[in-house]
Amino acid sequence: MLPTCIDRTIGRGVTLALSLALAACGNEQASSASGTDTGGPTTAGPSTGMPTTTAPTTTAPSTGTGTDATATATATATTMGAVTQTTGDTSEPSSGTTGALCPADAIVCDGDLAQVCDGMGGFTSEMPCPGGCVDGQGCTVCAPNSQACDGEHAIVCNAEGSEQTVTLCDGVQGVTCEDGQCVGACSAFELGESYIGCDYYPTVTANIVEDVYHFAVAVANTSDLEANLEIDKDGMLVLNATVAPNSVEVITLPWDYALKANQFVEPASLKAEGGAYRLRSDQPVTVYQYNPLEYELQGLDNSFTNDASLLLPVNVWTGDYFVVARNTWDVFDAGVQIAPGFYTVTASEDDTTVELLPSETGKLVIPGGGVLADGTGKIKLDQGDVLEVFSALTLGNPGKADVTGTRIKADRPIQVISGHVCTNVPHDIDACDHLEESMYPYETLAKQYIVTPPLIPTGGNVPKAQMVRIVATQDGTTLTYDPPQNGAPTMIATAGQYVEIQQTSADFEVSANNKIIIGQYMLGQEAGGGSGDPAMALSVATEQYRNNYLFHAPVNYDSNFVNITAPMTAKVTLDGAPVVGFKAIGATGFGVARLELGDNIDGNHDIQSDKPVGISVYGYGKYTSYWYPGGLDLTVLPQ
C-alpha cells in the first residue's frame, strides 16, 4: 500500500509529482509510529514541502443553508456536476482510518469543496459547493437537518441535504418563525388535522336564487381569545372583523356573479380568476358557508333554493378528490337549461396544475375554462382562482350526465365543492333545491360509515326518508350493511361508479373492502315529512369521529336539528346537558340521537363526549332546507 503522508493543504488544483510526494514520506512514517513530531506544521496553510506528523482528516460538512429564502418550491441538489480536473492532486483524502487511502471514486469534503478520490492519494476532480458538502455524498442544496428563519419564512432542510422546504409563517394568522419553525395557535403543529383551522377559501357556487339574498359565512371561534379575521378577494382586502371567544359571527359577502351563474342563461364551465374569497384568522375557527343565508326576506317570496357547506381549512387540503354531485335535471326556462350538477376547484397556491379524470357519467360536461366536452382537461390555477365545471344537457335522459365519480388530481393542495344548481330528489318529486358540500380529500376517506337520516320536523322521533349514494374509489368494491338493507347494492365494479339506495329512513352501517365516499340527499317536501326540500351532506367515517365539537346552526330557519352518532356506552352532552335516548344501530355498538336545537342567540352549540362521536346538522323552512356534517377529523388513513 502506498504511504499516506501527503499534506491535504497542498494545492486545490495544484499538481505535484507523485514521486516527490512519496519520497518525502520515509522519515514521517517512522516518526508517526513513535508518536514523536519530527517537524512540519500541522495546521492548514500553504505547503512548505515539509511532511506533517499526523494523518489528515476530513473537514466537517458546512452548516450553511445556501438557499434563497424567498423561494416557495423545493430545490434538488446536484451531487457532482461540472468539475475541475486535478489529476495528481497531492491533497490526501481520509477514509476515516488513519493511514488508509481514500477509495477510488469516493467523495470527500474539504470545507465546501467536494473532491473525488483517485484511490492513489489524489483526486480526479473537485467541485465548489455553494450549498455545503457532505462526505460520501458531495454537494448539497442545504445543510442536512438544518432549520432557519429568514424573516417570516421557515426553512427546513431534509436529512440528505437534497431538498429544502420554505414555509410562510403568516402574520395574519398570528404565526411567527422561531428557530426555523412556524409557531403560534394557528401553526400546523398546533392545529392538527380537523375541520378547525385558520385559513379558508369561501367559494360561491352556482345557484338560481335571486340576487337580493346573500352569500354568507358563519365563523365560530373555538378558542378562549378574540379571533381577528381578514377576508380578501383577488388580493384585495374585503373586510376585517372580530369574533368573540367561543362565539360566532355571520358575515355576508358579495356574490361572485360569474360563479353564481345567471339564473336565466345556460351556464358554461369556466375559470374565474381570483373568484374565491380568502378568510384568515389569528385564532382557530370553524367556517360554514351559506348559499344563500336567508330562507326568506320580508316582503319577498321564500328563496326556495338553499344549502350550506362545512368548509375545510387549507392545512388539511390535498391534491386528490372524488366528486359527489347529482345528475343533470332537464329543466327549461324559455328553452334554456338551468339545472346541471357541478363541481368547483379552488387553488391556494400559484401555478397549480389540476387534472380532471372523469367518471363514465362525468364524460358529458358543458365545455369551457379549459375543460373539454368529454370532461377531461389540465388547467393551471393561481391562488384564489376557481374552476367551475357543469354537467351537460341530456334531453330526455336526466341520469346520463353526472359529474359524480370524477377524480380531480392536482400537484398542489386544492379545495373541491360539488353539488347541483337546483334539483328535485327524486327527479319526479317537487320541488328543486340547491345542493353543495365540501368534498373530503381521498387520503382521509375510509371503508366504514354510519348513515342516519334526518328527523321530520313535525314532532316525534320519526326519520325523514333520504337517498343514499355510494361512490367507489377502486375497482371491485364490495359493500355490506349492518343491519342488512333489503335490495341494497353489494358491488361497485369500477372506480368512480356509484350506486344508490333510492329511498330509506333506516339507520345502518356501510362497510367496504376499499375506500368509499357517501352522499346523503334529503328528499323533496312532497315526498313526505311536511317540510324541507333537497339538501346534501357527506357521511363521516367512524374513524374520523371526534370527542368535541363547536358547531353552528343558523337562527333564521324554522327549526334546526343535530344527529349524534355515538357508542352506546358514551357519555355525551349537548350545550352542557346530558344526551339520552340513543337508538341502537344493528350490531355496530353505535346508536343515534336526533335532537332539536333550542333557540340560541347566536346559533352556536357545543358537544362533548368521553368517546369519539359523529354529528350532522340540518334545518328546515317551507320548501327549503340545509344539511352539512357538523365537523370531523381529517386524519390520513391507509387504503
Image (spheres, grey):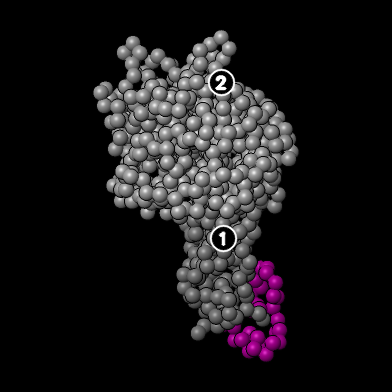
Q: Quadrant of the C terminus?
A: bottom left
Q: Is residue 55 left or right of residue 498?
A: right
Q: Position of residue 375 (x, y in %)?
A: 33, 33
The amino acid type of the residue labelled 1 equals Ala
Q: Which region shows up in magenta?
A: 23-52
Q: In this figure, what is the number of numbered marks? A: 2
Nearer to me, 277 or 630: 630
Residue 378, horizontal then vertical, whole percent: 38, 36
Q: Please state the horizontal and vertical placement of residue 228, each as a whole percent of the image.
A: 70, 33
Is 392 one of the magenta-colored residues? no
Residue underneath mark 2: 294
For the question of whether residue 422 can be seen, the reply is no
Q: Residue at x 50, y 53 (%)?
A: 589
Q: Judge depth for marks 1 and 2 and give the one in front.
A: 2
Q: Quadrant of residue 269?
A: top left
Q: Residue at x 59, y 51 (%)?
A: 570
The image shows residue 63, relative to residue 242, as above or below, that is below
Q: Measured along the vertical axis of the image, is residue 135 above or below residue 407? A: below
The extreme left residue here reads 396
Q: Name which residue lies at 42% across and 37% down.
A: 505
524 relative position to 573: left or right: left
Nearest to N terminus: mark 1 or mark 2? 1
From where the camera sits, is residue 263 visible?
yes
Q: Which disc, if any, is residue 354?
A: none
Q: Is residue 533 above or below residue 19?
A: above
Q: Nearer the viewer, residue 261 or 355?
A: 261
- As helix, strand or loop, the secondary structure at mark 2 comes to loop
Q: Is residue 30 magenta?
A: yes
Where does the image place residue 127, in percent across and percent down from the top left?
A: 53, 60
* Amino acid, disc 2: Glu
Give the number of the disc on residue 159.
1
